[in-house]
Each structure stands twice: as structure tokens, then as C-alpha cells.
Image: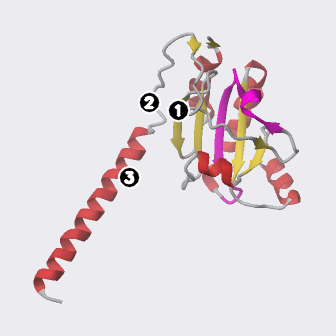
Amino acid sequence: MSVTTSTKALIGLLLAGSVGVIIFLFVHLSSDPSKPISVGSKSASACTKGQRDCLPDVTYTDTMGKAYTAADLAGKVVVVNFWATWCKPCQKEIPDFSKAYTKYKDKGLVMLGVMTDQPDKDQLLNFQSDYDMAYPVIRANSDILVSYNYPDALPTTYVFDRGGKQVFSHVGPLHVERLESILSPLLAQTVN
């Protein structure tokens, strides 16, 4: 390898690394959990099927066999959280998600915990008990993963308003105070 070739390779490597750092910073700064979300009005317009940033039209079936379809979720504020039993930040946020779910489920909140690993039934029941998990657990399948572009970091959370429009997404754990600050104005909306 000549000096010119190794210099070009080094420059290429540095450029690729720089681009990677810029993309990383953009993704993490654009999903700043302290940044307020904009609700806009007291009513949520329904998302048109196929429109960008709409709640994916897939069936979420929980570990108890209950199915959540697009029709079931219409008019609800929906939180979809990707997690795994081995994920330490997930373990930290699950009790907070459970508090929010328990507080708001009767006001139109649906929270779906999409589990990306495969513990057996007993392991999952023990995990749910250990972490006070109160909301439905959905085993990830290819339809769900494709619909959310295979989230590669855990936990990853998506929040959809009553019209089915995605209004918030975040990579990393969310605390109950931040989650409630997102959910409260959305739950106060009506669908037009």
C-alpha cells in the first residue's frame, strides 16, 4: 500500500466517523426528552391510513391473548414501548410506565409494552411481578418490528395522540414526570 492510498483510506475513515457522530448527535438531540411537545389544539385530527407518522395498522396481541387492532385503538392515546427483560434502562422505567398507565387507563390511555426478547411464560410472570408491570405485554413479531423500522436501541417509546398521529418518540428511559407531561395534554384532547 502506498502512502497516498493509506492517506486516502485514513481520510475516508475520518469522514465516515465524522458523519456517524453527526448522525448520532442529530438522533439523540432531536428526541430530547426535556423538550416540550406541541399539542396544537384541543382536538386531534384523525390520521389518514398510510400517512407518515400514523399509528401502524397492525394487530398487537398481548401475552394473555387479547388483540389490539386499529379499530380498538381509535380515539385512544397510545404508548408503544419497545423493551426487553435483560435491558437495565427498561427495568428502570417500567415501574414509572405502570404508574402512568394505572393513573390514566380509564381516561383513554392504552400502553403496549412490545417485548423484543423471548422469556418463557414463568420468566415473564416473574419479571412482571418483580417490576410491578401493570400494562399489557406484546411479544414482538415481524409485522410490528417492520412497522416501527426495527428499533435498534432499548427502550424506545412512541406516543400517538387520539387521532393516531405520532407526537413523540424517544430512545432511552422516560421517568413518570416526563411521561405525564406528555400524556396529560393528549388525554385532554377530543377527536374531530
Residue annotated with mark 3: 24
User: In terms of secondary structure, where does tag 1 sit?
Assistant: strand
- Look at mark 1 in the image and give the residue it sits on: 168
Q: Which of marks 1 and 3 is nearer the N terminus?
A: 3
Quarter holding the C terminus is top right
The quadrant where residue 112 appears: top right
Query: Which residue lies most toward the bottom here?
Result: 1
N-terminal of the two: label 1 or label 2?
2
Q: 139 or 153, which lies in front?
A: 139
- List x then y, in percent, for residue 185: 58, 17
Asked if the stretch drawn in magenta spans residue 57, the answer is no
Of the numbered discs 2 and 3, the one sitting upstream in the chain is 3
The reply to whether residue 174 is visible in this rendering is no
Q: What residue type is labelled 1?
A: Phe
Classify residue 173 as left or right of residue 5: right
Identity of the amino acid at label 2?
A: Lys
Comparing labels 2 and 3, the label whose residue is closer to the camera: 3
Measured from the top left, where is residue 51 in percent x and y?
53, 31
Against 126, residue 136 (above or below) is above
Residue 95 in the image: x percent, y percent? 71, 41
